[in-house]
Amino acid sequence: MDEAPAGTPRPGQSDDAVDGVIRTRALTKRYRGGQLAVDRLDLTVPKGSVFGFLGPNGSGKTTTIRMLMGLIEPTSGTAHVLGHPVPRAARTVLPHVGALIEGPALYGFLSGRDNLLRYDAADPTADPRTRTARVAAALDRVGLTAAAGKKAKAYSLGMKQRLGLAAALLRPRKLLVLDEPTNGLDPQGMREIRSLVRQLASDGTTVFVSSHLLDEIEQMCTHAAVMTHGRLVTQGPVAELAAGARGRLVVTTPDAGEAARVLKEQGVGDLVVTGDRVSGQVPKRDLAEVNAALVTAGVRVRGFGVQRASLEDAFVALTGEGFDVAG
Ligand SMILES: Nc1ncnc2c1ncn2[C@@H]1O[C@H](COP(=O)(O)OP(=O)(O)O)[C@@H](O)[C@H]1O
Ligand SMILES: [Mg+2]
């Protein structure tokens, strides 16, 4: 099917460097029961990004990923992956995509290595002559070489997730799609997966990773999209999303009570006092004047500054909701 010269987008095919490795337009899924799980989603995932798909449980992340992987049909709207329409061209696209969706399916009675051999053998486009070497390389990549001969049922949850990642890495991929890869892991397991994702991204693979954990996305991703109730709230570079939310004025002082009184006079709203730390909304007026007023009132100021907003601040500002961190 490849008669157009390399680099020339054919009609109906986009250049994914420009239009995104993943691009959806008004993508919508209403389940048979009537549940509107994804509502007119417009997503653009830039090439080379580590793209966090962030939202509380039930916000439509897995449903979106299943549509992108051609596992379920959208109700309406379109999706392109690596420039090809899905689900129509899923068979062309999917060999270039490594996916880990809702926990890997493993055979507990087989070793980690044998699980991968069997998984690869089930892929008609995988070369059997290089199978053993590719399985060994993937095991090495995720740090499972030493445990490769153990039965998968003896693996910890973190090891199982890593084995699932290894399955996604059996062949060179342009895109990795990981649905909540740290779900259910302990903090150590989560750190391992996060650092693995960063490593994978450092050699140019685009990674699309969903999570309901804000700080995780903030630590791991260059870009993010925020979902709530099936709708996209915002998307863009993580640094810009966080900067979109206003930071807070933070004053450290042994005279916290007096400082709060002066700050209130100066028009600082939403004051919170914890120990020697007073914080509030950044006022419209010149901060030099606010600082001078504190000093004039005899408040001993140790620290004075605007704390950078986090992605969490942005989320709360955008949705008016707290974030379900424990989820
Ligand atoms: N197979 C299904 N049939 C009906 N409703 C579903 C199905 N799968 C998910 N849902 C509903 O769709 C919404 C989005 O679910 P999901 O995509 O799994 O969200 P997330 O992955 O963000 O937790 C939820 O309200 C969920 O209950
Ligand atoms: Mg999910």
Image (cartoon, rainbow, N blue to C red):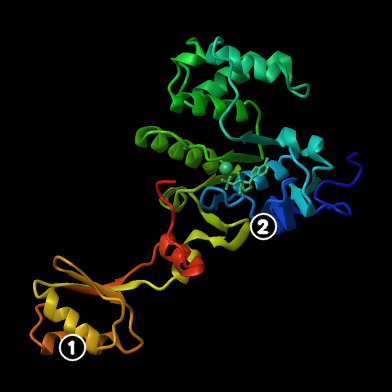
Ligand 1 quarter of the rendering: top right
Q: Earlier in the sequence, mark 2 or mark 1?
A: 2
**Where is mark 1, residue-wise?**
292
Query: Viewer-proximal residue, 126 or 275?
Result: 275
Q: Residues within 10 Å of mark 2 (few under 14, many from 20)?
A: many
Q: Secondary structure at mark 1?
A: helix
Of the residues shown, which amino acid type is indicated by label 2?
A: Leu
Q: CA distance from mark 2 to mark 1?
A: 47 Å
Pointer 2 and pointer 1: residues touching (CB < 8 Å)? no
Point out the frontmost of discs 2 and 1: 2
**Where is mark 2, residue-wise?**
43
Rendering coords of residue 23 (x, y %): 71, 54
Rendering coords of residue 310 (x, y %): 40, 62
Rendering coords of residue 255 (x, y %): 9, 75
Give the residue displayed 7% in from the left and 85% down from the top.
Answer: 298
**Vertical relation: 41 (above or below) 139:** below
Rendering coords of residue 150 (x, y %): 47, 11
Give the residue displayed 77% in from the left and 48% down from the top.
Answer: 74
Q: Quadrant of residue 174?
A: top right
Q: Residues within 10 Å of mark 1 (few under 14, many from 20)?
A: few
Query: Viewer-proximal residue, 38 or 263?
Result: 38
Of the residues shown, which amino acid type is indicated by label 1?
A: Ala
Give the residue displayed 73% in from the left and 55% down from the top.
Answer: 27
Q: Secondary structure at mark 2?
A: strand
**Vertical relation: 178 (above or below) 143:** below
Q: Quadrant of residue 42?
A: bottom right
Q: Is residue 122 left or right of residue 326?
A: right
